[in-house]
């Protein structure tokens, strides 16, 4: 099964790092975050990767053609890039690659988030329900101080627990070929377009991932990931073998 990595956005929320490179090429402990992401797939046997590019696509294309993407032959992967355009939204980036893979089920994810998700369990869940699409639901990182207030008095102040935050879209989709029919325009976000319509037609199911998940939307999150990356086994690779 091929993996689509969405890597064409402008990365404006972390513009300090993305002025001269696409967001998936931001370095985490000396390696682009997309390198760490691809290791999650490679370790679990998913070695066919298609990167959907756009903004500064030439940087990713040159990197893919290099000889030092991975540290060992055991991590050799089949990597392709598809330039899906500068202004294309996530729906168009996914559909642009899926059109080149007719009648194939794919995994798709964003190029700026890491998780120790069991891909085999994700696929088994997808196959069990028979719907067209599965989205991975995750707990968002608790970012703000939580206050409990009674009669304007703060009775508790502290970090909000991740479990209090509900569930959000964590990427790591499994998509059947028919999902293409739900992408109406390349300028439509996948989230507010295809996913919304899949949900309305009862064709979208959620796989709940309780383990590690961390996006890189801010410099603070980048620094957190850099600390994790120095560990002997980063949390996004723990429990995958």
Image (tube, helix red, strand yellow):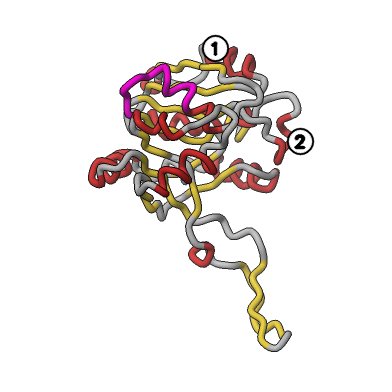
* Nearer to the camera, 237 or 202: 202
Residue 185 % position (x, y): 54, 29
For residue 174, which numbered disc appears in the image?
A: none
Q: Residues within 10 Å of mark 2 (few under 14, many from 20)?
A: few
Q: Secondary structure at mark 2?
A: helix
Which element carries disc 1, helix, strand or loop? loop
Residue shown at 42% from the left, 49% from the top: 200
Which of the numbered marks, if any, corresponds to residue 66?
1
Question: In the image shown, does 200 or 120 lie closer to the viewer?
Answer: 200
Residue 149 in the image, given as x and y percentages of width and height: 67, 82
**Can the viewer see residue 28?**
yes
Q: Residue 99: give x, y in percent of width and height.
A: 42, 20
Q: Is residue 16 shown in magenta? A: no
User: Which secondary structure class fits the magenta region best?
Assistant: loop
Between 233 and 237, the one lying in front of the other is 237
- The magenta stretch is 95-105
Crowd class of label 1 (few under 14; some 14 to 19; many from 20; radius 10 Å): few
Name the residue at 63% across, 79% down.
148
User: Is residue 70 found left or right of 22 in the rendered image?
Assistant: left
Q: Is residue 97 magenta?
A: yes
Where does label 2 land, which residue? 16
The disc, 2 or 1, on the residue closer to the chain's N-terminal end is 2
């Amino acid at each position: 099964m091929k993996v689509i990595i969405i890597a064409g956005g402008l990365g404006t929320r972390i513009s300090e790092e993305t002025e001269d490179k696409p967001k998936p090429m931001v370095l985490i402990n000396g390696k682009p975050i997309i390198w760490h992401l691809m290791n999650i797939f490679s370790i679990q046997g998913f070695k066919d990767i298609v990167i959907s590019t756009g903004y500064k696509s030439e940087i990713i294309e040159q990197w893919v053609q290099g000889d030092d993407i991975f540290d060992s032959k055991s991590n050799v992967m089949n990597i392709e890039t598809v330039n899906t355009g500068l202004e294309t939204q996530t729906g168009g980036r996914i559909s642009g690659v899926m059109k080149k893979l007719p009648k194939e089920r794919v995994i798709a994810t964003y190029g700026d988030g890491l998780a120790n998700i069991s891909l085999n369990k994700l696929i088994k869940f997808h196959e069990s329900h028979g719907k067209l699409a599965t989205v991975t639901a995750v707990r968002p990182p608790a970012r703000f101080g939580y206050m409990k207030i009674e009669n304007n008095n703060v009775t508790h102040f502290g970090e909000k627990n991740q479990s209090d935050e509900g569930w959000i879209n964590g990427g790591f989709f499994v998509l059947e070929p028919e999902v293409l029919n739900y992408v109406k325009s390349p300028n439509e976000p996948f989230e507010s377009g295809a996913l919304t319509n899949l949900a309305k037609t009862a064709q979208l199911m959620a796989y709940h991932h309780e383990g590690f998940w961390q996006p890189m939307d801010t410099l603070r999150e980048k620094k957190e990931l850099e600390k994790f990356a120095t560990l002997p086994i980063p949390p996004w690779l723990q429990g995958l073998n």
